[in-house]
Amino acid sequence: MNISDKDLLTKVSFLVKIERRAHFHLLEHLQEVQRRRLYADLGYSSMFKYLTRELKYSEGAAVRRVNTLRLSNKVPAVKKLIQSGELSLEVASKAQNFSQNLSPTKTKQILQKLKFKSNDEAKRILNDFTQGDTAAMPLRDIKKPISNSQTRVHLTLENKTLNLLEKFKAIKKFNSDEALLFLLNLGFEEIDSKIQITKNSKGTQGRSIPSNVKKEILKRSNYICEFKGCDEIKNLEFEHIIPFAKGGLHTLENIKLYCRTHNQRSAIKAFGQLKMDQYLN
Ligand SMILES: [Zn+2]
């Protein structure tokens, strides 16, 4: 590289400014993608899946961006702090994890203390806020894939739950996997049995979907979102392809089991973005 030492340092400072400006614009555009639930059209049920699977961010980089977006939704000034370099994505992400249950005012006070702080300094400042109260930090299950068919999981259980699980394993002579599989199968049988078959249902009358149709759809979907390419298993809801209000029938062909994102995207398409903005955050 044919450049003097002085010019090289000047150029790097300049490029860092451009990088931060790009972070600002990217966050603004991702916020709009989120508002429109646009990743739903690509088969993704969340911003995180869109960032990792479509845009090929690492999981850590995607989490930092998702967290920073959430923080900007609560405190819009965050994007400017990122652009000016007062807040890094890492520190913004930590601030979001810490403040998710706090008010915007309290969050702003915390952000003031995190300006120009390194990752480690931010960690210490946030620890001081909790004064060692670990209950303030959410405990998450940790999953680490160890082969194509097995995952090591760190769970946090209440002691009484753990005692019952150990007792059950001892009585049935099960390992943890066998015990959980047995109990989960029982749980799913209970879910299925609660959906009673409605007698004499023609499947087209009344506002509510007949339970025999629901049962068939749950079986067909295997409790996974039915939008092409989506693998979401949480927050599933029934969605009429032709809305019931527009004459759509309660038939297997006209009803899909969709995750919340795919239901929301369908609603945006059917009723318009402006109308749906009041219901979506
Ligand atoms: Zn979905």
Image: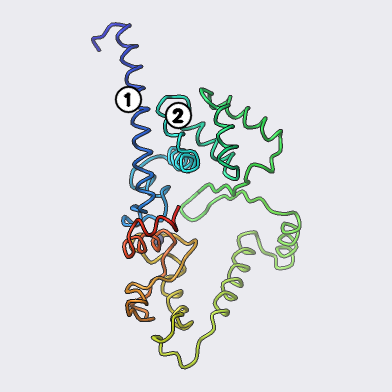
Does 149 sit left or right of 54 as displayed?
A: right
Task: Work out whether residue 228 or residue 89 is closer to the camera in this orientation and state it.
Answer: 89
Q: Residues within 10 Å of mark 1 (few under 14, many from 20)?
A: few
In the image, 142 versus 8, the foreground residue is: 8
Mark 2 / mark 1, whichever is N-terminal = 1
> Rounded to the nearest whole Å, what is the CA distance between mark 2 and mark 1?
14 Å
Query: Which residue lies at the image location 57% right of the left edge and 80% below the top edge?
Result: 193
SS category of the residue bearing label 2: helix
- Residue located beneath label 1 in the image: 18
Mark 1 element type? helix
Position in image of residue 118 (x %, y %)? 53, 24
Ligand 1 contact, mark 1 (Cβ < 8 Å): no
**Is residue 142 shown above or below 89?**
below
Dots 2 and 1: beta carbons under 8 Å?
no
- Amino acid at pointer 1: Ile
Quarter where residue 168 is shown = bottom right
Q: Residue at x 58, y 24 (%)?
A: 121
Residue lying farthest bottom? 200
Counting from the top left corner in percent of width and height, residue 132 is at: 71, 34
Q: Quadrant of ligand 1?
A: bottom left
- Indicate the quadrant where residue 247 lies: bottom left
Q: Using residue 13 as the reference point, say whether residue 154 is left or right of it.
A: right
Total labels drawn: 2
Q: Find disc 2 in the rendering and name its residue.
A: 81
